[in-house]
């Protein structure tokens, strides 16, 4: 990595480092529409999914992995802006217990509900061109997910990862506070963030979309009328999941076609929200095969 | 709470506070066989499940909730040893972002595989008397869970919570490092720790138990031969789940009757371990109804 050695930043007050640290805050992310990723696996996945990488940062003293070094070399050759960080500064940017020494700044990307031009089919809007032909989209068309105010960013990221695995075609974020670019969400999503189409809109816009597209809205609720196992729905469907503490808001519950519950044994009255979403999405997806 | 006012501890070096703080470490827990719980919900659940509470601690300035205060009063009336902590000391013991001002020290409890005297039926051994008649045990007999070296205590706790909800009759912990009493595991288990029978034993003891009890051992593995949806198993069964990073050890994979996988879409090659366990347990449990 001797060719084109990027500048070394060692000072905490260096504006290039400050700009990175700013992305650890919610305000910094929303002002810039950027976010941070960290680790070789995440960076490799971002490259593979052609996510919009703005710049990379790395700590050469930690980045010993051959594949990781090759990845950085490739980015430098493609003229992606890069800086080197001192170990101390690098450590300040990572949530990992064993940091891998490389990370990147990416541009946040949201899609539009209109991109799902017909129920269960991806649109061809040029706004999200790379996703229109992604295998994630074509594999199990017709299942969507809508999230409202998931409190824990870790849970949000885990849900995004789970949704991709279950073949979800797109995820609506209905809470103004749902922040998929939070470092803990990014980390838990394990790269699924780069391939999923995320749509940020209000609850009313969402219910309008669902109605006009003829998509069945299935709300998950502990007070659901139907046990999810008894659920049969052949139409394209969107699963709605609400906050860990408060569940879905009244408006969304009322606007749904079905409310389903997961019947529980023992003295449990609830499941972790990511586990519950996984159980429901995989069940929905298996009933479509 | 003026009757029998418990002593107030304000000094960081006070041995009563040091004893509590010691339980935040793995060594402290294994030396004493005790662990900490925190929050009104957890304490109420511990009382309800008749978990062995050794002592309580609370911060009167934070414990404003009427139900929480009543709970503490009841414990004082039952002569459970108690101390009051200064806000500063209390904050040091909690993982909660909004601490509720009350916690307790509990005795760790493990069961024995012999307690599951016949496959799918609870024994009547006096070692775990309170659990022999618990509704969690009788609701869906015949599904067990075996965990090997789950890396994240939060995942371990979430799995214990999920297992109770899915009607699991007992959980084997096969890794020497599986610590269900870790504060993050306790917190994520949401009280299910108090009602589940946990058995700590070696992988060989476990496979001996499964074989002699005629229980089908189903190993979860990304390389599983069978998609879990195609799985049909009418015998009592135990689901085996391994570490997030390394999966199950070779010995356990070989000793299993089936290896099942969760087929994934998109570019996902794995799920969060708690989500995967939830999907598999709820599927197993639904196929038994």
Image: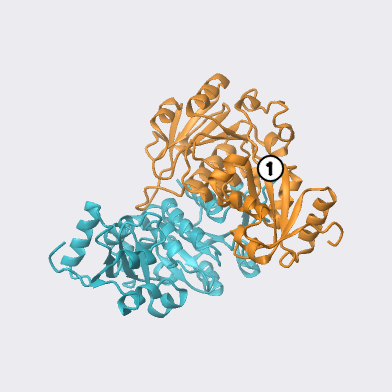
Chain colours: A cyan, B orange
The answer to whether residue B142 is left or right of residue B83 is: left
- Please say if B268 is above or below A253: above
Q: Quadrant of the C terminus of chain B?
A: top right
Among the 4 quarters of the image, the one containing residue A192: bottom left
- The answer to whether residue A121 is seen in the rendering is yes
- Please say if B188 is above or below B115: below
> What chain letter is assigned to the residue under label 1?
A
Of A147 and B152, nearer the camera is B152
- Please say if A168 is above or below B174: below
- Residue placed farthest to the top in the image? B212
Residue A143 at what x, y percent from top left?
Answer: 47, 57
- The answer to whether residue A119 is seen in the rendering is no
The answer to whether residue B182 is left or right of residue B257 is: right
Residue B256 at what x, y percent from top left?
Answer: 45, 27
Asked which secondary structure carries label 1, the reply is loop
Q: Quadrant of the N terminus of chain B?
A: bottom right
Residue B183 at what x, y percent from top left?
Answer: 58, 51
The residue that disc 1 covers is: A266
Seen at 57% across and 51% down, the residue is B24
Residue B184 at what x, y percent from top left?
Answer: 56, 52
- Please say if A40 is above or below B150: below
Of A77 and B277, nearer the camera is A77
The answer to whether residue A140 is left or right of residue B43 is: left
Seen at 45% across and 73% down, the residue is A25
Seen at 51% across and 43% down, the residue is B277
User: How many neighbours does mark 1 have within 10 angstroms: few (below 14), some (14-19), or many (20 or more)?
Assistant: many
Of A102 and B58, nearer the camera is B58
Seen at 55% across and 21% down, the residue is B214
């Amino acid at each position: 990595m001797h060719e084109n050695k990027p500048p070394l930043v060692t000072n905490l007050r260096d504006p290039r480092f400050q700009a990175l640290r700013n992305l650890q805050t919610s305000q910094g992310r929303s002002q810039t529409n950027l976010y941070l990723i960290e680790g070789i696996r995440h960076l490799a996945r971002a490259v593979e999914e052609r996510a919009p990488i703005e710049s990379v940062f790395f700590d050469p003293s930690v980045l010993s992995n051959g594949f990781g070094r090759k990845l950085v070399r490739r980015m430098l050759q493609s003229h992606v802006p890069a800086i080197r960080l001192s170990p101390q500064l690098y450590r300040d940017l990572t949530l990992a217990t064993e940091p891998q020494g490389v990370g990147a700044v990416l541009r946040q990307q949201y899609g539009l509900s209109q991109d799902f031009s017909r129920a269960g089919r991806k649109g061809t809007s040029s706004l999200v061109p790379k996703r229109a032909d992604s295998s994630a989209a074509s594999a199990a068309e017709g299942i969507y997910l809508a999230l409202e105010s998931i409190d824990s960013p870790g849970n949000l990221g885990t849900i995004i990862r789970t949704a991709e695995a279950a073949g979800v075609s797109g995820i609506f974020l209905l809470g103004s506070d749902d922040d998929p670019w939070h470092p803990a969400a990014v980390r838990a999503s394990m790269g699924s963030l780069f391939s999923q189409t995320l749509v940020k809109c209000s609850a009313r816009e969402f219910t309008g979309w669902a109605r006009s597209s003829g998509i069945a809205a299935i709300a998950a609720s502990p007070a659901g009328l139907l046990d999810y196992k008894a659920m049969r729905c052949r139409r394209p469907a969107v699963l709605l999941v609400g906050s860990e503490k408060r569940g879905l808001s009244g408006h969304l519950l009322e606007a749904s076609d079905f409310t389903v519950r997961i019947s529980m044994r023992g003295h449990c009255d609830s499941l972790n929200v990511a586990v519950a979403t996984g159980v429901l999405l995989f069940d929905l997806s298996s009933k479509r095969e």
